[in-house]
Amino acid sequence: MATIEFITENIGSFLVFVITFIILFTILKSKLSFNIPKGPTALPILGNILSLKQHDELLKLILDWCKEYGSIYSLYFGRRLFVVVNGLDAIKEITTKTGLDFADRNDSVAIRDINPNRRGLFDTRADEEWKRQRKFAHTTLRGMGFGKVSLEPLIQTEARHAMDYFKSKFGSKLDPSIAFGVTSSNVINKLVFNHRNDHGSESGDELMRNVRDLMVADEGALLTLFPFLWPVLRYASKWRRLDNAWRKIKVFFNQQIDIREKRMDACEGELVASDFLDAYLIQRRSEPNNYSLDSLDLVLVDLFLAGTDTVSTTMTWAVIYLANNPEIQQKIHDEIINEIGLKEVSLSHRSGLNYTQAALIEVQRLATVAPLVPREAARDADLCGHRLPKGTALLINLWSLHHDPDVWKDPSQFNPDRFLNNDGTLVKQPDNFLPFSAGKRMCMGDQLAKMELFIFFTSMVQQIKFTIPSGDGPLPMDGLLDLARKPKPFQVQVSAWSN
């Protein structure tokens, strides 16, 4: 009786004890069930943010930490856990051996503002919506020649326009990045909208500026630590620029969509697609629940980002390496002239241009335009002997593959010979060379990008000579890191070859 009275009188305290015990047991059990990799000591609240650096210094720092903590280690940006994945074995495991366990993309407060439902091809979860949109985009574009030799005439046409633009600038200095942006965007522009922009045209330059303004990855320390400040920080200049670019791009897309919709409404026969936009709108009419206009906007912008930025940024880096290494530029030019003369460059010429191909591969390795690939754990899962909780942010460090001194002698040196045998034949590309990543979320436009890069690069060195302006020092080799690793602003002299 006394026991019952004691329990009745102290029921409140007893319930508090039981609930506290359950909560503590659940937290302890959760922590014990995971095996977070070690990493640099993190400060309370701030995490490792004070230790981080910017741009290329950050890439060097996380490569140094790899030597100290191993191929997989943890960092904290504020209270948020990031796991950095380095080296061939670990990167192969996360990209090709773990299925979709780590195939989600990192969430971002800023990007969520323009893509709240995580639609499109890039900033998405690896869910059924992503699978459907990616499969449709890949199948439709492949049917239009995406990555096939049948697209060669289109790429050659854009190469001719680009060379004509550079020739019109002979004797002057210029920043080549805008020209390369228009050139590469016109290829995807033709596939998506059956349209192209002339070099120097107001519409073409504006589209490229808006696409570039969307290339924001770094949220900054303040927003990372205090995401609840977004309603205030969104008015900072870079986020206003991103929002403004997104609005302008949506207006452009919506104008194109309205034109196509009216044309289809007026069509009395069977609807036939002339480009990707037509194909999507036709598919939407048969499956409106699976193909929305919101998804279309994001798919289109992702195609432009992926189809434009990788190629244009790689070509811009190529100009820097060529101008800084005139003897290598001369050697590439001589091989091209000796092999094909001034004939229009074709994909069939690849087999006779080994040094040219080696130089282009070396540009991709040294530049590594996508050094840190973001991922997120879609569920509790194992990676390299570690059990990671759902929602863990990950960074796949491709820089660690392309700049590992144990794999590449003098990794910061531009040396095409590292990809050639003693007899001058092309070396099989090593496993440590993954410019387009790997696995289910690798760049789906890798074959098209390779075709564009070869024709653009070879045509360029065949006809255009790049030199450092008189009185200037070597062009900057260190990059600016955002969503892509881009060169610092520079100008180069363009001229004709003496032969």
Image: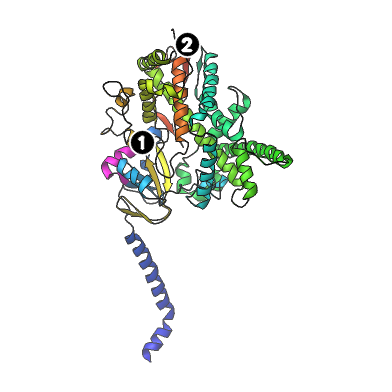
Disc 2 from disc 1: Cα separation: 35 Å
SS type, badge 1: helix
Q: Quadrant of residue 334?
A: top left
Magenta segment boundaries in residue numbering? 58-72
Residue type at tag 2 = Ala
Tell me if mark 2 has few (under 14), some (14-19) or many (20+) residues whose alpha carbon lies within 10 angstroms of its own.
Answer: some
- 431 or 482: nearer the viewer: 431
Q: Residue 297's spot in the image, x, y percent? A: 59, 42
Question: Residue 444 bears which disc, if any?
Answer: none
Residue type at tag 1 = Trp
According to the picture, the residue beneath numbered tag 2 turns out to be 496
Residue 486: in sight, yes or no? Answer: no
Q: Is residue 442 left or right of residue 287?
A: left
- How many discs appear? 2
Query: Quick one: label 2 or label 1, which is nearer the N terminus?
Result: 1
Q: Residue 21's spot in the image, x, y percent? A: 37, 71
According to the picture, the residue beneath numbered tag 1 turns out to be 399
Q: Quadrant of residue 55?
A: top left
Q: Residue 410's spot in the image, x, y percent? A: 28, 27
The colour scheme used here is rainbow
In the rendered image of this protein, does residue 265 appear above or below residue 10? above
71 is within the stretch colored magenta: yes
253 is within the stretch colored magenta: no
